[in-house]
Image (cartoon, rainbow, N blue to C red):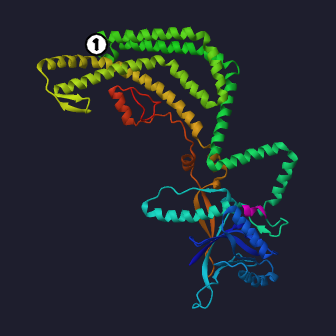
Amino acid sequence: MVLKAFFPTCCASADSGLLVGRWVPEQSSAVVLAVVHFPFIPIQVKELLAQVQQASRVGVAVLGTWCHRRQESEESLGHFLEGLGAIFSHEPWLQLCRERGSKFWSCKATHRQVPASLGAPGQDQVMLIFYDQRKVLLSQLHPPAALPDHQAGDATASAGGLAAVFDTVARSEVLFRSDQFDEGPVRLSHWQSEGVEASILVELAKQASGPICLLLACLLSLISAASTSRKANMLVSVFLDVALGLALLSWLHGKDRIGQLADALVPVADHVAEELQHLLQWLMGAPAGLKMNRALDQVLGRFFLYHIHLWISYIHLMSPFIERILWHLGLSACLGLTVALSILSDIIALLTFHIYCFYVYGARLYCMKICGLSSLWRLFRGKKWNVLRQRVDSCSYDLDQLFIGTLLFTILVFLLPTTALYYLVFTLLRLLVVTVQGLIHLLVDLVNSLPLYSLGLRLCRPYRLAAGVKFRVLEHEAGRPLRLLMQINPLPYSRVVHTYRLPSCGCHPKHSWGSLCRKLFFGELIYPWRQRGDKQD
């Protein structure tokens, strides 16, 4: 049987001692967490491991011995380490040794409790895998993406073994609080042993700086603690939203830009209304050489021109108050950029209300004619729509009904091109307004849902978000144990956004392109802000 031993790279130069870690029997793996140095008392080592097990709920035990032969006199130390297996009984018992003045390692895994018929202790082959303990402790392993069926089983088993290693290191943080520089009865070597001097300097700086550094430490601990539940992404999103809103507020109230916007708003509204008047006059003539029904064309054109006249009067009536209204609305930017963008979308809806009214009038008139033509077409075929059963049934009509239906069908057919042209023009204008509002809503959704904290981790600390691991061969020779280096594969940016994307209000349209085209063809009103399943008119 091949046994996998995960050994931290920070302990490769540590002094000889005991290997402390966790045994994972399902994966036949031993995860080494630290090295206990001499001198030590066995009962104190057992008490320390019992405290770690109670605090972390991880089965930490002495897995074997570690021998680092640096000098000639230390060669006799191996015989002493072999005798420690009787005090710290564990199956299998690991024996790792680094040769003096050489890059080669020796790895053994022996079984002392074997059947008597075998006569000698058993020995397994050991695969030594080095890992960066600090990166594994701080990283979060994500489940693999969807794979084909023939690879799903292997991927699940591999992910389960890696998850056990990552979980063991993450939950054993209590063990890393003491190291070889402490004055306690047990001295350990792990990833924090290399930077303890810097940690002391940091603690002295904290005590000297007073409450300011304490406040920063609380904020950093809040963000790091919230990152497990994705609250850090929400906090960073809110901070960025408010910062951008304050920047927009300072820009608006600087150099009297609100007054400039108010002075430019009325001329822009007049220019839009003038362009609409020219468009309606073009439709009331012979647009693109088309022959329209003159009576209906004149009625619709004058009806819409009267609405434009009302709209211009309304804008000029509100013009003295526009600057004050914009000044008060600009203060809402202190609540965040998304609030200001939402108010901007509402302002666009109010300024284009006359275009919306034109669209509704044209859509209703066009829908009525389409429904009338479809009903009269069923009349010619001897069919009718059964309202109770919601289906088309056969029906017999007399001569008078067919005659009246023919007259109505002919009238609607000849009036349909004029109505359809007005409906087409105002639908295009309405879609233009909806597109602008949709872009604003997408920007609001982007600011609210983009996981900026996770993207920052992926950019600055790629190992914090792990998609898996890869192994690099360090040594592969006959008669020597296979030595591998485990490296973390960072999570792709697309999966980071997909995994940590914050829930949003979902203001974007939920309908497909086919459903949208069907609604436009039959004259149904488009409500892009409504969700699927809402009651339609």
Q: Is residue 164 above or below residue 246?
A: below
The picture places residue 291, in percent across and down from the top left corner, at 28, 15
Which of the 4 image quarters holds residue 4?
A: bottom right
The spot of residue 83 in percent (x, y) is 74, 83
> Could you say where residue 493 lies in the image, as x and y percent from the top left?
57, 49
Is 269 left, or right, of 515 in this rendering? right
Up the image or down, 66 lies above or below 274; here it is: below
Q: Is residue 30 above or below residue 330?
A: below
Residue at 47% from the left image edge and 27% from the top image edge:
434
**Of residues 290 and 96, which is closer to you in this image?**
96
Q: Is residue 211 found left or right of 371 in the rendered image?
A: right
Residue 148 magenta:
no
Q: Which of the image's four quarters has the N terminus?
A: bottom right
Looking at the image, the residue that sits furthest to the right is 208
Q: Quadrant location of the C terminus?
A: top left
Is residue 175 rendered magenta in the image? yes
**Total number of numbered discs in the rendering:** 1
Residues in magenta, as a range: 174-178
Q: Nearer the viewer, residue 270 or 23?
A: 23
The relative height of residue 440 versus residue 180 in the rendered view (above or below) is above
Residue matched to label 1: 293
- Comparing 248 with 18, the one in front is 18
Residue 481 at least partly seen: yes
User: What secondary structure predominates along the stretch shown in magenta?
Assistant: helix
Residue in view at x 52 percent, y 18 percent = 351
Left or right position of 20 against 387: right
In front: 458, or 274? 458
Q: Quadrant of residue 397?
A: top left
Identity, as a three-letter code, of the amino acid under mark 1: Asn
Residue at position x 58%, y 47% from top? 500
Q: Give the SS element for disc 1.
A: loop
Q: In the rendering, at what x and y percent does residue 381 appear?
A: 16, 28
